[in-house]
Amino acid sequence: MSGLSSLNVGSQALSAAQRALDVTGQNVSNVNTDGYSRQRVQQTSRGSSVIQAMWSRSDSSTGGVDISGVQRIRDGFLEARAQQEHATNAGLGALKGTYADLEATFGEPSPTGLQSQLASFWNSWQEVANNPGDAGPAGVMIEGAKSVAGTVNRFASQLSDQWVAARDGMDSGVTGLNSLTAEVARLNGAIRSATLNGSSPNELSDQRDVLVLQIAEATGAVATPGDNGIVNLTLSGRTLVSGTHSEQLQAQGPTSYPAAPGTVSLTWAATGQPATVSDGTLQASLTALNVTIPGAMTDLDAVAAKLAATVNAQQAAGFDRAGNPGTAMFSGTTAATLTVVLSDPAGVAVSSAMPPVFNGTNAIAMSAHANDPAGPDTQYRDMMVRLGVQAQSTQRRSDTQQAVVARVDSARASTSGVSLDEEMTNLVAFQHAYSAAAKYITVIDSTLDTLINMKT
Amino acid sequence: MSLRVAQSTLSTDALAGLQANLARLQRTQEQLSSGRRVNRMSDSPIDGATAMRLRGEQAATEQVGRNVASGLSTLGTADGAFTSMSDMLLRVRQLVVTGLNDTNGPSQRAAMAAEVDQLKNGLIALANTKYLGRPVFAGTQDVPAAFDTTTGQYLGNASAVQRVVSTDGSATLDVTVTGQAAFSTLFSNGAAAGILSRISAALVAPGGPAGLSAELANLDAASATMQSARSMVGIQYNRLLTLQSSGATTLDSVTASLSAAENIDLTKTIMDMQVQSTGYQAALGASAKIIQPSLLDFLR
């Protein structure tokens, strides 16, 4: 051990403290950066020599300090869990939005909804029965029928609009996903080069992991770590990103509703094979496009068809003012095509008997259809209850999942997040280490000075 | 695991708590401003369905109220006609009784016959009384008048006009008596002449008023029939009145049920909002105090 090598130890201590201060500065700078994981300088103490030789020995262990690397503090298990939970949360959130839109379309229960319009339509038939042959109540009844048909038509067109909007959202979601996977592949390449070079890829890894989380939110893709810091992504067992290579997805199926038959699906752009997304917003879009919105439309079509069939059958059972059997009141058997075709109040089949009798019995029978056990009113009410129950359960699942995600995020933050108190404590510690190292150098300097200026 | 608390954990948790508080406040605010507890089906599918059903029930009850009112007006019109007709029949009876006296000469009898004819025209006009364009005594027949003004023949039918008096449309009540039941052979007897025409003819008969005494008995019988028809109208009127008052009660209770299913309890909701708003302010204050300081504030 020589005096000069003691200076070397001091210099190492200075640069280690300096490096630790730098990393603390980096942590403090990124306290609010999305996806940033705190970093730590890994220091190892250095012995004099690794292998002792027979005649060349040193009894000192004062080799100084070594910086073996800068480590990103991150829990891989928590990250994987976060990706899964975020995917489920994003999917439920999107589904909740779909149901909220559906509920806004129907707007029940309300004094102005379809249920109320149907009730006043049926009641207006009793008013017709009270004044058979009077064009006034019959005209009011026909206007009521038009408003019912208009409301059903509006529902149908709003459902179509919602479907088309969801389909557009799906297309832009797939485009976004493809650019995300390409970016992950590019970052994988940069990280591998950095790792092989021996430089720190920590910031690149953080950036990449943010993108991986976004991909998981869209598709529920699973990330597995690979060699040299890269991450591979798989979608239901098939490779989405492998190292620096990424696969593209595309949306297939009809783009307008309800014109084209068939379902919307995702396929691999390269092979055209179907791609299975297990979770996330794209999965929720597929559910909305293939199940939720068409289901509501089918229910609404059934209500419209039942209404037209019920009213037309009762019309045909009665006689109008001129003594002819009543003609059809509604045409069309779907929600989009339901139309009132009867415009003349004299054509309303009020009476159950031929002239000269003109009673209101058929109109009374018509109004009683409001209470049919399987009539349009009951069907519509059942449909609303189904929708309400589904929306409510989706909402509850989403609320629960949000709580889970908050928990997981909080656990991640408690591992990877920057604590300013901790950084400040470290800052003080490293500052003291730096001062102490400087003091050590001063002491060695004066020792050497003493030695050099010693008089013989 | 020993929980390490980072600054981002604190701010995320504080934000999540504030968001949850604010979401509760927004929900209460929506309920307060709309006045309704169930604003969409998912708020409570059960209450939503009940509200939809009760709203239908409410509309049906209101419609029954209108049906009953319309029935009452029809019956009122019929009753009014009966009142005037009773007076006129009484006058006819007086004339018949007077005509039976041999003290009257042919010219006086002719005058009486003329009065009976006038009364007959008046009675037919009353029997043709219309309510909203339909003769009230013609049953369900689609005719401009219940009785032919010249021959006195009945043009209506024997079916009664009905009004729906239950919310499910199944129960109906008759709201008329038909002309046939009320006036029997007063104006005509099939194609033959009716009692009034026969009285008028008997008064001016050349052989003296011998046939009048038989017609007096017929007239009394017809009066009795009309009185019983009138009491029938009274009974129907009473039943409708009962329904009207019970309908009002039903409407009240349906409205109350609807309100219970979907409306807010104002006091409770306002209290809730107060509590939530206090909670929100407390959360804001706590967040501001907790997030702000760090060790930085205490180092030189």
Image: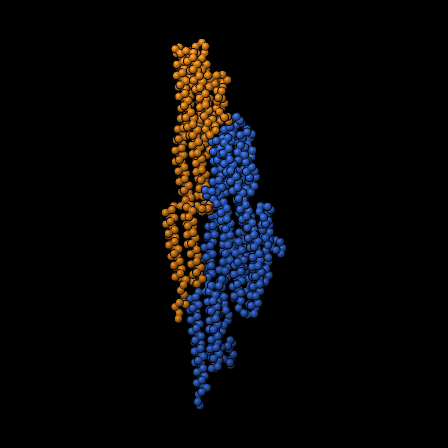
In the picture shown, does residue A51 fall above or below B7?
below
Front residue of A62 and B204: B204
Say which quarter of the image contains residue A187.
Answer: bottom right
Q: Residue B51: horizontal and vertical position, in percent?
A: 44, 42
Name the residue located 55 percent from the left edge and 53 percent from the top edge: A169
Chain coloured blue in the rendered structure: A
Name the residue located 48 percent from the left edge and 69 percent from the top edge: A23
In the picture shown, does residue B206 fall above or below B286?
above
Q: Residue B272: horizontal and vertical position, in percent?
A: 38, 50
Say which quarter of the image contains residue B1.
Answer: bottom left
Tell whether A384 sits left or right of B94: right
State the residue lying farthest toward the bottom: A456
State the residue lying farthest toward the top: B207
Q: Is residue A280 visible?
A: yes
- Which part of the image, by quadrant, shows the C terminus of chain B? bottom left
Front residue of B184 and A22: B184
Name the residue located 63 percent from the left edge and 55 percent from the top edge: A271
Front residue of A155 and B72: B72
Q: Residue B138: horizontal and vertical position, in percent?
A: 48, 25
Q: Residue A414: horizontal and vertical position, in percent?
A: 45, 62
Q: What color was chain B assigned in the picture?
A: orange
Name the residue located 56 percent from the left edge and 68 percent from the top edge: A194
Front residue of B112 and B66: B112
State the residue lying farthest toward the right: A271
Q: Is residue B181 visible?
A: no
